Amino acid sequence: MNLNRRHFLAGVSALAAVPATGAAAAASRIIEARPGKVQLVSGDFPATEIWGYDGGVPGPLIRARQGETISRTLVNSLPQPTAIHWHGLRVPNNMDGVPGLTQDAVSVGGEFQYDLPLTDAGTYWYHSHNQSTEQVARGLYGVLIVDEPNSPDVDHDLAVVLDDWRMNKEAQITEDFGATHDWTHAGRMGNFIHASLSPSMDGVQTNQRLRLRLINVATDRIMAVSLRGLSGKLVAHDGMPVEQPEDFGVLVFGPAQRADIIADVTAKPGEPVQIILHERDSAYVLSELPVNGGGRAAPRGSIQPLPANPVAGIGSLTGAREVPLVMEGGAMGRMRQGTYKGQLLGMRDLVDQGQIWTFNGTAGLPEEPLVTASRGEIVRIAMENNTVFPHAMHLHGTHFREVGADGSLGPLRDTLLMDARETREIAFVADNPGDWLLHCHMLSHQAAGMKTWIRVT
Ligand code: C2O
Ligand code: CU
């Protein structure tokens, strides 16, 4: 049988399967990274061999209340060293999970205990931050939900995990993780886009209220998604509540970006609620929920904002530290040379080392931070994308706001999707001490050079 995308997508139009990670595993303080097998593609296809937390994809849903501290001991049963990054959580620096910057990679058979104070409520996720082009592509990620002290009243609270797999005809992950063409272009694009819903459910009822936590965990693909049979508002970006719930149409997610949606079911029994993926000139049903009879007579009232998280306000931008970040490289770029591991190299030598992109002329993690800020200082980074590709810029350790051309401040985010040739500026209060990565979350681009770091003292 020939596996093309259309076939695959047809195969997953029914509710996505959720892996069999038992309740016991989810409650345990151990999280084991190990190979597993998951029935990702339905029909006659065999189960897919993956690497997953507790052997599942996504890994166990971790859920706790704001203000709590949770602990997980990572046990590495993979054939490679690994580490977990808790994406979007403002954790102490030594818990951030970045080998080469905040910890050593956990060796094969080794362990590492993560203690995570949950300062902010919202939708977060966790993933491998070692050889991540391979390890995330193989399935090493999971959802982390931090509940507000008083969560909004909804009937169903669902995580919707969007992923993009590159598979062969036997529905097995292809092992071409470092392919030069991917690294020099838009990254590793898959042929099987999958939405998994957790918890899995039989259906919803008209006028029920849902909270959907959409997360793009793909290594490189930007996903444009809309919802059919629902009417509601966007209440948070990247875990952080917006001040006023926003209307939305097609939601665009760069890798790692999230949105929380609160919406009421408008579909009647017989017309399902659908999650639709938009491509340039087509659209596919990624997942659907049947609407069963016996719903509420009327929807609930208006959708209220979620309570703000305790993030330091930027106040005024006057006197802020201003740092330029020029992004170059990639196919069709104008980059001719770059510094790598302290040496100035021509393009050909860089490519030989798998380095194709630079920040301020340097590929890979530079010896010196992009900026050293003292605690409490306001930092502005103007990011100039001198390439012909979009990039999803992610800062560890703190959320930032985009600075508009008029000096206005956008919503708090941890990942900013930039179009080709765009210049966008972010600002944040440097209040979390330590060394924090700033990189493109298109993991192929990150591996091929797009990373730097900041120091907060
Ligand atoms: Cu989601 Cu540096 O990572
Ligand atoms: Cu990129």
Image (tube, rainbow, N blue to C red):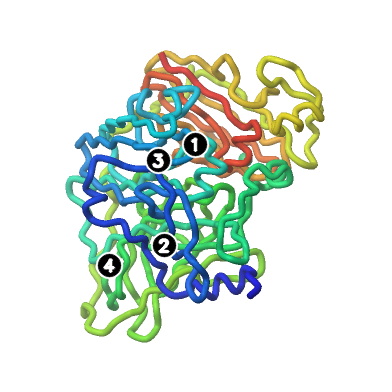
What's the amino acid at mark 1?
Gln
Q: Badge 1 is on which residue?
A: 80
Between marks 1 and 2, how big is the CA–CA gap? 26 Å
- The percent position of residue 127, horizontal first and vertical second, equals 43, 42
Name which quarter of the figure residue 68 lies in: top left
Q: Badge 2 is on which residue?
A: 196
Q: At x 72% / y 29%, what residue is drawn?
A: 353
What's the amino acid at mark 3?
Ser
Name which quarter of the figure residue 230 lies in: bottom left
**Residue lying at the far left of the rendered structure:** 150
* Of pointers 1 and 2, the one earlier in the residue sequence: 1
Between marks 2 and 3, how big is the CA–CA gap? 25 Å
What's the amino acid at mark 4?
Arg
What's the amino acid at mark 2?
Ser
Image depth: mark 4 or mark 1 in front? 1
In this view, the residue in front, 131 or 412, is: 131
Q: Badge 4 is on which residue?
A: 209
The reply, left or right, for residue 448 in relation to residue 83 is right
In this view, the residue in front, 316 or 455, is: 455
Decide: few, some or many residues near mark 3? Use Cα within 10 Å; few <14, some 14-19, many ≥20.
many
SS state under label 3: loop
Q: For the N terminus, which image quadrant? A: bottom right
* Of pointers 2 and 4, the one earlier in the residue sequence: 2
- The percent position of residue 299, horizontal first and vertical second, equals 25, 72
Between marks 3 and 1, how big is the CA–CA gap? 8 Å
Image depth: mark 2 or mark 3 in front? 3
Q: Are marks 2 and 3 in contact (CB under 8 Å)?
A: no
Mark 4 C-beta to ligand 1 under 8 Å: no
* Of pointers 2 and 3, the one earlier in the residue sequence: 3
Q: Badge 3 is on which residue?
A: 77
